[in-house]
Image (cartoon, rainbow, N blue to C red):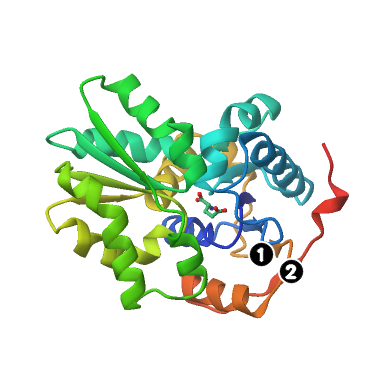
Amino acid sequence: MIGIFDSGLGGLTVVRAIMDRLPGYDIIYFGDTARTPYGSKSPETVTRYARQNTDFLLNKGANIIVMACNTASSVATETIINSYDIPIFEVITPAVKLSLKTSKKLHIGIIGTRATITSGIYEKKIKKINPDARVYSAACPLLVPLVEEGWLKKPETRMIVKKYIHPLKVRQIDTLILGCTHYPLLKNIIQQKIGKKVNIIDSSITAAESVKDFIAKNPDIDKILDKKGESRFFVSDITKQFEKTAKVILNQKILLEHVSMSTTHR
Ligand code: DGL
């Protein structure tokens, strides 16, 4: 099974992208809705949660793990990769690689949660591959709650996106990475505000493509992944609002199963 976790339900954007590219592969998802948001928490706390989430998915039979959460990918990747002997995917590297491949001016913008932007991970990875690239980033802490409220087209959301994007626009970036699970749902507004010439890279899509490529190149792993077309969605808290958000993201009604994370300590 492909195990996928996120701080909440935003990671369903990655699930959707994986389902589109690997139809029929069984997926087990965990959204840590009781402890969301991760974007305003310390790296130590997010890393501890990431371990617990990984343990949970492995206990449920996951064979590979996708950290759909940009914040967890930013601060916990090294610890998770060093702690488990299975393929672990994060959402940052694939977006970085595509940005460098497609940007002509090498003026690249990143938007994400405060924790992701503070970690400086995108910039480090981009500069490591191409030190000539210019990287401009902006933390957009209000966008996650707006998406979770379902305010996808409200004038207030447009106004806030415009304000966050402005500093990147004046830098004349030609590429913008959406470094957060929730931002694909605001892609149209972000495109309008940054301008149609800027190429937007959706980290949920690049992550899904990296998983697909890996599976194609590793038939031994492909063999052990179940393909019964079954998916299960676990969350650490269930509310009506989460059910609504899940439906908007996946475009279908799903059954959310509750799990208490207090039983998994590490
Ligand atoms: N999943 C988080 C991310 O992609 C956004 C929500 C949160 O802050 O927990 O960074």
Across and down, in percent, residue 160 comes to 34, 64
On screen, residue 17 versus residue 24, left or right, reads left
Q: Which amino acid does label 2 sit on?
A: Glu
Instruction: Give 24 or 92, whichever is nearer the viewer.
Output: 92
Q: Where is residue 73 in the image (x, y as percent from the top left)?
A: 53, 39
* In the foreground, 97 or 1: 97
Asked whether 252 or 72 is in front, the reply is 72
* Point 48% across, 55% down: residue: 14
**Residue at x 60% of width, y 34% of height:** 76
* Mark 2 residue element: strand
**Which label number is shown at residue 10?**
none
Contact? badges 2 and 1 (CB < 8 Å):
yes
140 over 214 or under it: above or below: below
Residue that badge 2 annotates: 257
- Residue 216: in sight, yes or no? no
Q: Tell me: residue 80, above or below residue 24.
A: above
Callout 1 crowding tier (Cα within 10 Å): few <14, some 14–19, many ≥20: some
Side of 95 relative to 35 (left or right): left
Q: What residue is drawn where x is 44% and y is 49%? A: 208
Q: Which quadrant is the C terminus positioned in? A: top right
Quadrant housing residue 182: bottom left
The answer to whether residue 60 shows anywhere in this view is yes
Q: Residue 138 location in percent, x, y?
A: 35, 45
Q: Which of marks 2 and 1 is nearer the N terminus?
A: 1
Name the residue at 43% across, 31% down.
120
* Residue 245 relative to residue 138: left or right: right
Q: Pinpoint residue 162: horizontal percent, then vertical percent.
A: 26, 61
Per the rendering, the mark at residue 233 is: 1
Q: What residue type is labelled 1?
A: Phe
